Image (cartoon, rainbow, N blue to C red):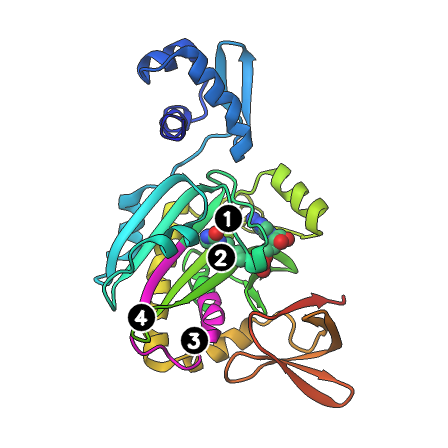
Amino acid sequence: MSALRDELIRAIADGSQYNIDQLAQSLNADARVIDQAIASLPDIGLSVEHTSSKIAQLARPLKLLDRDAILAAAGRPAALNSLDVFGSITSTNAYLLKKTPPPVSQVDACLAEHQSEGRGRRNRRWESPYGSGVWLSVGRSFVRPPSDIGAFSLAAGVAARRALLACDIPDIGLKWPNDIAHRARKLGGILVELRQLPQNRLRLVAGIGINVTLPDEARRHLAESSGTAATDLAAIAAGHPPDRSHLAGTLIKEMFDCLAEFESAGFAPFADEWREADVTDGVMVEVLDGGVSCVGTARGIDTDGALLVESSGSVRRFVAGEVSVRLKA
Ligand code: BT5
């Protein structure tokens, strides 16, 4: 069904009205199967309008990811081992973690139009409706991992911000440890997963999700289910978001540069840029660490990326991956 569904989406992506019998003929499938495939599109985040039982149309046109345009925007990096572009997948991070690791110093990249089990930290869910964002993972392994590899998700935030700026999206903030933010709303997030390999090698998969045109239903669902105020590039860029393939390629380029820079110099070269983008610096925050709450004033990050919080006259350090931050307003 999934391959047929991808073909169907390609066939109707331009948002015109399509006759279901004609679609069935051109896709070499039974009209009932096409009907079912169309009926399943809302489940993956695509709204369909029916003007009659025989005519279907996407609620809005869809420009699909284009592998050549992505490679061109990425500058065809020499370190690229593979670039997979999927219609629907469980999770781009999960996919790269299962794949045989690329040769050392080479990088795999993977994108999908839709993730059925997109993941955030601590088993949280990342909403990834079809064609509405850039859902990207890059993966490589290190023979001698930098000692501050735990701060890589902060460096990846800096890389994402650089990519957005290169696509004419300024004023992007970063919220410790892994949020990409715009005016107190969540535009995207980063998930870094590490796995120990034999012979002391370390495998790293870094996933970045950035909302480009998030459907209203997804935004509503996020507000209701987790109180998340989400935003997208369409809102930030007044209805003219960057082309997704161009953004995806630019992100790949910045992530490749980030991986190379981090390998040679660790987090240090990213720290000042991260501090510039820090949305909680000087703000009252609540840090939740293993069920214990600490309320205090955020004082930026330490050289290793740990969050510093001033509370009752002393400064406490919180390490990436174990803490969540709540703005107290
Ligand atoms: C993150 O986790 O923010 C990391 C998100 C990483 C997603 C990418 S997409 C490509 C790659 N493949 C994957 O499977 N994942 C990565 P966390 O800080 O735990 O935030 C999760 C929370 O963000 C959820 O509990 C929701 O409240 C909220 N959220 C979920 N989907 C969202 C969306 N599309 N936009 C804004 N907020 C969202």
| Residue type at numbered disc 1 | Gly
| Residue type at numbered disc 3 | Ile
**Residue interval drawn in magenta:** 137-157
The correct choice, above or below, for 252 with respect to 17 in the image is: below
The residue at which mark 1 appears reads as 118
Badges 2 and 4: C-beta atoms under 8 Å apart? no
Neighbours of disc 1 within 10 Å: few (<14), some (14-19), many (20+): many
| Residue type at numbered disc 4 | Pro
In terms of secondary structure, where does tag 4 sit? loop
Q: Residue at x 33, y 61 (%)?
A: 253
Residue 99 placement (x, y as % from top left): 32, 53
- Image-quarter location of ligand 1: bottom right
In terms of secondary structure, where does tag 1 sit? loop
The residue at which mark 2 appears reads as 169
Can residue 267 be seen from the camera position used here? Answer: yes
The residue at which mark 3 appears reads as 149
Q: Nearer the viewer, mark 4 or mark 1?
A: 4
Q: Nearer the viewer, mark 3 or mark 2?
A: 3
N-term-proximal mark, 4 vs 3: 3
N-term-proximal mark, 3 vs 2: 3
Distance in Å between CA atoms under marks 3 and 2:
28 Å
- Name the residue nearer the viewer: 301 or 107: 107
